[in-house]
Amino acid sequence: TGAILEPLAHDCVAEAIGYHDSPEVRMDFKRFLTQAMLAVFTITLLGCGSDQPVAEPVIEVTADLPPADGVRMIPVENGRFKVWTRRVGNGDIKVLLLHGGPGGSHDYLVNFADHLVPSGYELYFYDQLGSFRSDKPDDVSLWTVERFLEEVETVRQALGLEDFVLIGQSWGGMLGIEYALKYQEHLKGLVISNMVGSVPLYVEGVNQLRGLMPAEAREILERHEAAKEYANPEYQEILFGQLYSKHLCRLDPWPQAVVDTFDRLNTTIYNHMQGPSEFEVTGTFKDWDRMDDLDKITVPTLLIVGRYDTMRVSDIEEMDRRMPDSSLLICENGSHISNWDDEDAYFTGVLDFLNDLKTATR
């Protein structure tokens, strides 16, 4: 989001994180988060996803981490580009994480290491092609669901993962569904976190949330959308106050790992595949729908949704009914990023699922 923030925005964030006793600081922090969210969902930013060098942040977790050589750059697309991966922990059951976006990064998933590594699971973080730590080709023909699917398989082969668990969150959940439909013979289990099996169903659900907004707020959205003024501060304020802070992440302030992911979003990929707005999915995956294929996924599957999610709970319940070996976790206090705003319930459910898989192999 740095390309659209005022020059002192980062100072503002540092102050806001340090204290909250000033109304002015609180308001500045809200403005920062509004800008960050808008970067994710509504506009293309100059410089975001660029090749400008940025120091890699430390993964701050309580668990013991492996040496830096846990990082591997894996060739994809016949060696033309490389993607970043990192192994954390050691264990008989390997877990590969697929982050959201598209065009996001793994940063907001780092708390998986806090919970999974101490329980004996081997975890693989991974930034998809075009994402923060991976190569960023200037070629929009690469940004398709099918190509990302084959990238996941390339990464799996390079890491030597077999009989492993795939966890996909949001857009990563869409990729997880696609992977299971084509390559489930390699899977021990699948976790689809905060993702419905149909983009049209998602659009219906998020526009239901829009319908619950005050009439004045809806009028502001409609006026700016008609003019394609997605960057308008008035539009941004409604998005943050009425949608993102209630249904994306309910914590205040947001964890730095969450802010980092949105700050590092490659909006070229996001806008090409999703579209210019949360409410207007016009990109290349706008017609994606796998609801009628879910019965073909036979591996044990955990479905996760937050009670306040942008994904409708009823749609995830329908997925559970259609899948032959699935279980459902509803995070009652969570929203779309429920691994943060309902962390205890989320990881209790994930660990129960993984432990059941471990027990089944003995």
Image: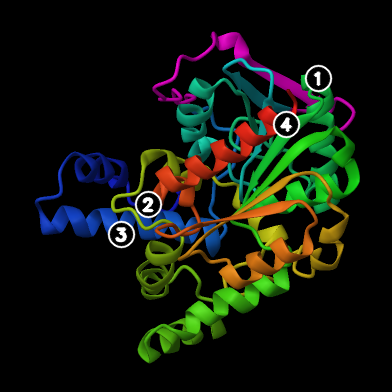
Q: Earlier in the sequence, mark 1 or mark 4?
A: 1
Task: Name the residue tied to disc 3.
Answer: 31
Residue 112 in picture, x, y percent from top left = 51, 33
The overriding secondary structure of the stretch rendered in magenta is loop
Q: Is residue 223 visible?
A: yes
Cα distance between the residues tagged 1 and 3: 44 Å
Horizontal and vertical percent position of residue 245: 37, 62
The label on residue 360 is: 4
Q: Residue flagged by tag 4: what amino acid is it?
A: Ala
Query: Who comes first in sequence, dot 2 or dot 1?
Result: 2
Q: Find residue 160 and name its label.
A: 1
Q: Earlier in the sequence, mark 3 or mark 2?
A: 2
Of the image marks 4 and 2, the number of the one nearer the N terminus: 2
Q: Which region shows up in magenta?
A: 55-82
Q: Is residue 102 visible?
A: no
The span from disc 4 to disc 2 (Cα, nearest Å) is 51 Å
Circle on res. 192: none
What residue appears at the point 39 percent right and 66 percent down from the top-left corner? 246
Q: Secondary structure at mark 1?
A: loop
Whole-Å distance between the Cαs marked 2 and 1?
42 Å
Kind of residue at disc 3:
Arg
| Residue that label 2 marks | 5
Query: To which quarter of the image does residue 361 belong?
Result: top right
Q: Nearer the viewer, residue 47 or 291?
A: 291
Mark 3: give few (<14), some (14-19) or many (20+) Cα within 10 Å: many
What kind of element bears circle 2? loop
First along the sequence among labels 3 and 4: 3
Tell me how far mark 3 sits from mark 2, CA to CA: 9 Å
